[in-house]
Image (cartoon, rainbow, N blue to C red):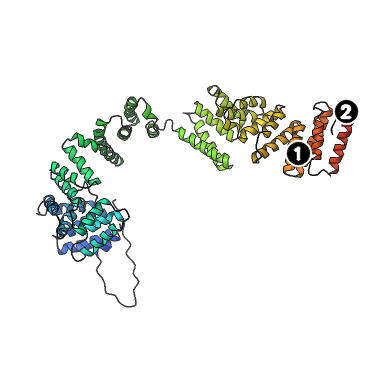
Amino acid sequence: MILSKSRVQPARTVASEGKQEAKLPDLEDFLSKRDYQGALALLQFRRNANRHDVRNLEFLAYCQFHFGEHDKTLSTYKELLSFEDPDPLSYALSIYKELLSFEKPDPRCSHHLEGFVYPSGLTGTGALVLPIFISPRPPNGKEAGDDGGRHTGGGAALAPTGSQQSTKSSQHHKELLSFEEPDPLLSASTRSRLSFEEPDPLYYVYAAACCYYMGMNKEAESYASQGPRCPLQTRILFHCAHKMSDETRLMEYLALNVYVALCYCKLDYYDVSLEILQVYLNAFADSALAVNLKACNAFRMYNGKAAENELRSLAELSNGSYLENDLIRHNLVVFRSGENAMQEYILKGVVHASIGQMKDNQEHLKTAQQYFQLVGASQSECDTIPGRQCMASCFFLLKQFDDVLVFLQSVKTYFPNDDDFNWNYGIAKAATGKYKEAEEILSTITNEKHRSEYCYLSWLARCYIMNGRANHAWELYLRLETNDESYQLLQLIANDCYRMGSFFYAAKAFDVLERLDPAPEYLDGKKGACIGTFQLVIANKEPKDSLRDVIAMMKNGNDTSNPQIEMITRVMKKWAKENGVKVA
């Protein structure tokens, strides 16, 4: 990551009572605080004292890079490369070969290994010896301010030489060995450094890297094959197989091209991405991932039409099955400048509507209505079936059911036996007072889950009552278990039956409600419904046998001593006796 040239706030110190001796800042202190400006000042001061200090130049290049002075960084690297030193790769390789030849490596070799090979190239600045394989690190092998466990291994290998080396290396080794599941590569390196019983297996990988950069591909492959399995070893083997055109080995690492191509695409190097990706596509032309990535590159370089043409080849190879993939469908929407993108808004509208209805949340319902309106009113969707359904849903949430019917009737022929459509259509019919049609539509629903929901039962019961079939509504109630929904349905039946003059079933409903909850309004409702039933019996609009049930309900109430109830029952019994109706 390239950091900006922001100035670091100078550390504030509080003067103590006694005078303290001024201490020269240490480079490591600057790096730990990411104070690259201060580090550059110190390094430049040291450079003026000794312009041939290679290690000082390496730190200088590192700090210049992170401070954003890339032109100066390049100049520093050029100066490092201009020194008349032996080829660092050849020298490094000779050291690794010597290390690998030891049965018990001489611990003194670690001084040469850390003092030259690592700082100068392998994991130093990452720009002199192995810039492709190993990520950039400062010459001491540790990012400033980074104490992560993964970097501990680098710190162990790259601790400064001299009096502090033994202490810092030992500290890093202890940290590594204290992990519950240590990195297999680092732990192998650590244990070999501590016991000196066998060569470090990572030396094979480092030797392979040196050979590869020197053009010795066979030797690089040989060394890498003997090393431990790790990302660096895998990449060396892949590049060696590519250089030597070893198809068998190359196929094992061919998929790396896709990931490398993806990285280049993310970096906006689309032409490079296409070139690398083609290596994989030559072997696997029907790869959905690779073709999709190629289409994305074409979209960035040219236009959506070119990108869609790339996906067309994938459709031909897979008989269209791959086009059902969610990722490819999403990209097709992007390639077509948002065409069919309204599906996302429909989904959001459905989710908000569901949450709003379940939680009775008006904010969610309002959001859902806005999404449905956005889709239904759009020019691309207004005359489509989904668009008209969205407008119907919008008006449904606004409770403008006449407008709902306008849109649903326009697409009714496309949903002859669709339970979901009939649900909405039937409720909209009932809400506009067209109960007969609503009853017919709701009765066609066969989905048992729909038929058991309270919303369906309540609307169907209302249709029954409004169509003069209150007995069917009462049967719906009798089939339910005793719970909150049955209680709500009972209230609906009592009030709707009373309103429509079906007093007998209104009296039955109010009677149950009064026994469940002795509220005055339920008693008043029962008395009114019983008197209404008595009136219908006298007018021969209700069977005379109903009078017996009415008198029984009046006697079974919670307030049988009420004078009004006694008077009502006395009148009913007198009329029954005079007309030969048995009520006892």
Q: Which residue is mark 2?
A: 580
Q: Hey, which quadrant is residue 194 in on the image?
A: bottom left
353 shown above or below 89: above
In the current view of this chain or complex, which residue is farthest to the top?
Answer: 413
429 shown above or below 68: above
Residue shown at 24%/37% (left/top)? 252
Q: Is residue 446 rendered to the left or right of residue 243?
A: right
Q: Hey, which quadrant is residue 298 in on the image?
A: top left
Q: Hey, which quadrant is residue 31 in on the image?
A: bottom left
| Closer to us: 503 or 219 | 219
- Callout 2 amino acid: Gly
Badge 2 vs badge 1, beta-carbon distance below 8 Å: no
| Closer to us: 216 or 189 | 189
Dot 1 surroundings within 10 Å: few (below 14), some, or many (20 or more)? many
Label 2's element?
A: loop
Q: How many numbered discs sit on the rendered protein?
A: 2
| Closer to us: 374 or 351 | 351
Could you tell me residue 290's position as x and y percent? 30, 34
Residue 37 visible, this angle: no
Assign the C terminus to one quadrant of the image.
Answer: top right
Dot 2 surroundings within 10 Å: few (below 14), some, or many (20 or more)? few
Could you tell me residue 73's position as x and y percent? 21, 53
In the current view of this chain or complex, which residue is farthest to the right?
Answer: 578
Could you tell me residue 456's position as x and y percent? 62, 32
Q: Is residue 150 rendered to the left or right of residue 380?
A: left
| Closer to us: 384 or 545 | 545
Could you tell me residue 14's position as x and y percent? 35, 71
Q: Which residue is mark 1?
A: 511
Closer to the chain start, of discs 2 and 1, is: 1
- Callout 1 amino acid: Asp
